[in-house]
Structures are given as C-alpha cells and as structure tokens.
Image (tube, rainbow, N blue to C red):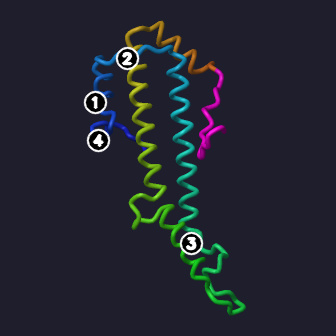
Amino acid sequence: MANDDKTSASPLANLITEAREGRLTVRMDLERFVYIDRDCEYFKDQIVDIQATMTRISNQDKWDLGEHFTPQGERDLVSGKTMVKRWREKSQSTQNPNNIYKVLESHYKVIEDFQTLFRTVRERITGVDTDQAARYHDLETNLPQQAPATPKIFSWPGL
C-alpha cells in the first residue's frame, strides 16, 4: 500500500504540495514528529492486521453454522448460509464496494497521506537546520515508545 508519489489523488495533495514548496507553516516540537510518525506506522500495521482477518473470514470454508450438509444427513440451515454469505460479502467481497477490506484501504491511504504531510514538513525543517536534523535523529533513536491512544469501537454515555 505504498503511496510513493501519488499525492495528486489524495485529499491532502494540496497541503502536501504546500509543505514541499515551503508555503505551509507548522509549529510543533520535533518529538511530536517522531510520535506522529510512529503512531501512523502503528495504525497502518493495525489496518493490515484487520485486513488479514477479513481475508481469513472471506476464505473460511466451513463455519459450522449449518450452512453445509452434515455427514449424518441433517439439512442445511438457510439462516446459517445467509449469515456466512453476509460475513463473506462484508469482509472482502468484490460484489460489495463498501466491504471492510476496501474501507480500511481508504483509511490506510489517509493515514499514509498524513504521514507524508508531516514527514514533508519535518524534512523541510531539518533540511535547512543541521542542528535540528541532528536533534531529530537523536529523538527518533532515543525517544521512548509511547502507546497509541486506545481506540474505542463502541461508546456509550458515561463510559
């Protein structure tokens, strides 16, 4: 899912271009650049892991929900077949353009674009100031890991 230089198709293309050309101003400590980059890598890895799960769901042969005839001659359960079909379609079906795999692909692209934007700004900062470049390299090497925010899938008032 590498983005190399396809910024023209991205929603952040204009900001990335502004950053490359030095017309974008960002005020931020260099350590924040390190953490943003690490967090982007973390979330991209999480997306890839979830996509792998969606692939396994899509390729799962038997779910034991009554979707197949059993050796004892029991009948198929229509609801079991329906559930399995829906899970496969929602996970990675080519017939469903909004399957989870594809939706996560678009999220991956947005995270990659944010990462490109912040890397571009950081490169401009460290590219003209050797002291800042050395400080950034030191931070990148020695800054302790910071746990990314724990995402809440469901949220209820009071929780």
Closer to viewer: mark 2 or mark 1: 1
Residue 78 screen position, x and y as percent: 57, 82
**Rendered-image quadrant of the C terminus:** top right
Query: Around disc 2, counting alpha carbons within 10 Å, would you say few (fewer than 14), some (14 to 19), or many (20 or more)?
Result: some
* Placement of 15 over or under 151, stated as above or below: above
Which residue bears the numbered disc 3? Answer: 84
Q: Mark 2 or 4 closer to N-term?
A: 4
Inter-mark Cα distance, 3 to 2:
51 Å
Q: Quadrant of residue 149?
A: top right
Q: Which region shows up in magenta?
A: 144-159
Residue at (64% x, 26% y) in the render: 145
Residue at (38% x, 60% y) in the render: 97
Q: Is residue 154 magenta?
A: yes
Q: Mark 2 or 1 closer to N-term?
A: 1
Question: What SS does tag 4 mark?
Answer: helix
Which residue bears the numbered disc 1? Answer: 14
Q: Mark 1 or 4 closer to N-term?
A: 4
Inter-mark Cα distance, 3 to 1:
43 Å
Q: Amino acid at mark 3?
A: Val
Q: Mark 3 or 4 closer to N-term?
A: 4
- 137 or 117: nearer the eye? 117
